[in-house]
Amino acid sequence: MIALNPCPKCGGKAKLIRGLPNMGNSKTRYALVQCRVCFYKTPTLRPEQDESSESLKNRAISLWNSETR
């Protein structure tokens, strides 16, 4: 797994959030990264075509790590 950088806004610790949304019968997975201190977060990412859960997770982490400090 790719390591999460500190929050680009406050320097706080980040966490990966992933799962299934609670919208009706939707089975679409999602992933995002959010700061535990200021709650800044990436956009919610959904899988592209047949993307694996691991790839979706790594894409969310890469997006977080690429945020400007």
Image: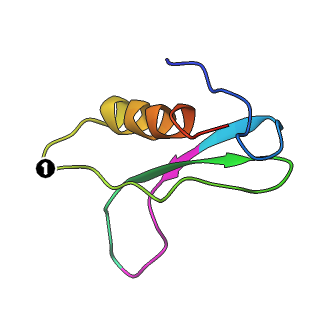
Of residue 62 and residue 45, the one placed in the foreground of this image is 62
Residue 25 x/y as whole percent? 33, 76
Q: Can you identify the residue that label 1 sits on?
A: 49
Crowd class of label 1 (few under 14; some 14 to 19; many from 20; radius 10 Å): few
* Residue displayed at 83% across by 54% down: 38
Q: Is residue 23 magenta?
A: yes
Residue 35 x/y as whole percent? 74, 46
For residue 55, above or below residue 50: above
* Residue displayed at 55% across by 31% down: 65
Residue 49 x/y as whole percent? 13, 50
Q: Which residues are magenta?
A: 17-24
Residue 2 x/y as whole percent? 51, 19
Residue 55, by quadrant, is: top left
Q: Main secondary structure of the magenta part?
A: loop
Kind of residue at badge 1: Gln
Residue 4, by quadrant, is: top right
Mark 1: which secondary structure?
loop
Furthest residue toward bottom:
24
Q: Is residue 25 magenta?
A: no
